[in-house]
Amino acid sequence: MEQLLFWCDLIGIVVFAFSGVLAAGHKQMDLFGAVVLACVTATGGGTLRDMILNVPVFWLQDTHYLWLASATGVVSFYLIRYLQVPMRLLKIADAMGLAVFVVIGTQKVLGLGHSAAIAIVMGVMTGTFGGLIRDLLAGDIPLLLRREIYATAALSGAAALVLLDASGTLPGEIVVAIAILVTLSIRLAALRWNLSAPIARFGNHG
């Protein structure tokens, strides 16, 4: 189980770092800006989670995460200079990172002995706040705050993991895989069919 979570963590770092570079590319940032966005996207959610829980920040304990995010940033920067990368790929990469990090965050908090509610909140934060910081630094409205189905996908995946884990009927590896698929499926379905959440309206627009 620990090995699976470790590899999921690495995949999440790479995918989210790549999404950070894509965002930088669409804003025509230089290499430094691209690497900064790669690192904050890959580590932002987990950093905030660990600080709130008052546990050692994961990339300070193991600097390989930071080096991996930086290396992905550099390689991706030069890759996208020679390839035409559609903006839609940013959302797909973000969806993959979201699915992995929501589950990683939720599982870590459960492992620390916190309640299901705290695990879900921290899982959603782990999956969404790196992208939120990326979008703010890139000068965009964060995906988390748009009408797109984003936080709902994260919440569904975290809740699925908590419920399946509590039932105790499935191996941990299967629980993790199902939770990742739930999050990813909802997010990709929203992208495919342009599904969105209701928006707030003030006054009479009828």
Image: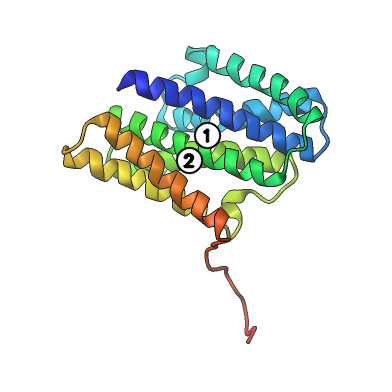
Res. 142 mark: none
Q: Quadrant of residue 69?
A: top right
**Quarter occupied by the N terminus:** top left
Render colour scheme: rainbow
In contact (CB < 8 Å): disc 1 and disc 2 = yes
Q: Quadrant of residue 145?
A: bottom right
Name the amino acid, label 2.
Met
User: Dot 1 lies on which element?
Assistant: helix
Residue under pointer 1: 45
Q: In the depicted view, which residue is nearer to us: 87 or 198?
A: 87
Residue under pointer 2: 125
User: Dot 2 lies on which element?
Assistant: helix
State how far apart marks 1 and 2 are (Cα). 6 Å
- Label 1 crowd bin: few (<14), some (14–19), many (20+), radius 10 Å: many
Q: In the depicted view, which residue is nearer to us: 114 or 186?
A: 186
- Report the residue at 40% width, 42% height from top: 181
